[in-house]
Amino acid sequence: MRILISNDDGYLAPGINALAEALAPIADIVVVAPDSNRSGASNSLSLDRPLSVQRAANGFYFVNGTPTDCVHVALTGMLDYRPDLVVSGINNGPNMGDDTLYSGTVAAATEGYLFGIPAIAFSQGAYGWEHIEDAARHARDIIQRYYETLPAPYLLNVNIPNRPYEQLTTPVATRLGRRHQAEPVIRAKDPRGREIFWIGPPGATKDAGEGTDFHACAQGQTSITPLQIDLTHQTQRDALAKALA
């Protein structure tokens, strides 16, 4: 198996290093990741400047761009082969519910999916990297067990609890939950007295009932949510068609 690995926390992050180490025994891997933390970059491409690709001492490639840039450059210019799987993460903290729209971790996997390649985004259920090696081992188990069981291509969003490996149980299939409206921006002053704004924290969970990714992680379970890209609101489309007739 040949696996392309990326993330949004940057090529030095513990999550991507643990993931690469865990997957190396079962696959030929190549790591192409941002040069720094690009959390919240979503599916953005850098179109206003050229991108540079450099190689670190550990063999990882790093790009001065977004997670989507990394996967796009790898698939369309760097690699002379087509990977069997694109894997993103392991992210520092969860990507559940509405978070997936902003997540660079999910975006890197999405870019692979858009090229027709199976793709999986891995995140930890809590911040801080606790038990990251256990999460990486669990991610390897998921890939080995489920890689060939789903019709390809697929896009999976996985959240793994920060627990010892022995406490990580069989994953459960979930749907995305929902959050309340995000908290207001935080106003501040820069050193020259100019007003600046920090993006506030995400809203609290709104739909975290049974069957959601929020509920699974709250129960200490690994959540796997299959995602799709078609954003068409079919019901409104039908209503629009009638209105335009």
Image: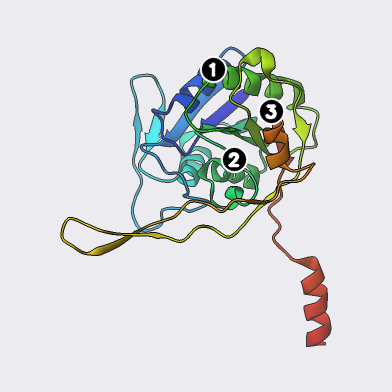
Asked whether the residues under the numbered discs 1 and 3 touch, taking CB atoms below 8 Å apart as contact, a structural biologist would say no
Q: Which residue is mark 2?
A: 109
In the figure, 217 relative to 212: above or below?
A: above
Q: CA distance from mark 3 to mark 2?
A: 24 Å
Residue 109 spot, x, y in % from top left: 59, 40
Q: Which residue is mark 1?
A: 133
Q: CA distance from mark 1 to mark 3?
A: 17 Å
3 or 2: mark nearer the eye: 3
1 or 3: mark nearer the eye: 3
Q: Which is nearer the N-term, disc 1 or disc 2?
A: 2
Badge 2: residue crowd in 10 Å (few <14, some 14–19, many ≥20): many
The amino acid type found where label 3 is placed reads Gly
1 or 2: mark nearer the eye: 1
Q: Name the residue rendered at 73%, 64% in the picture.
A: 232
Q: Is residue 235 left or right of residue 217?
A: right
Residue 27 at least partly seen: no
Q: Which residue is mark 3?
A: 220
Q: Quadrant of the C terminus?
A: bottom right
- Image quarter of residue 187: bottom left
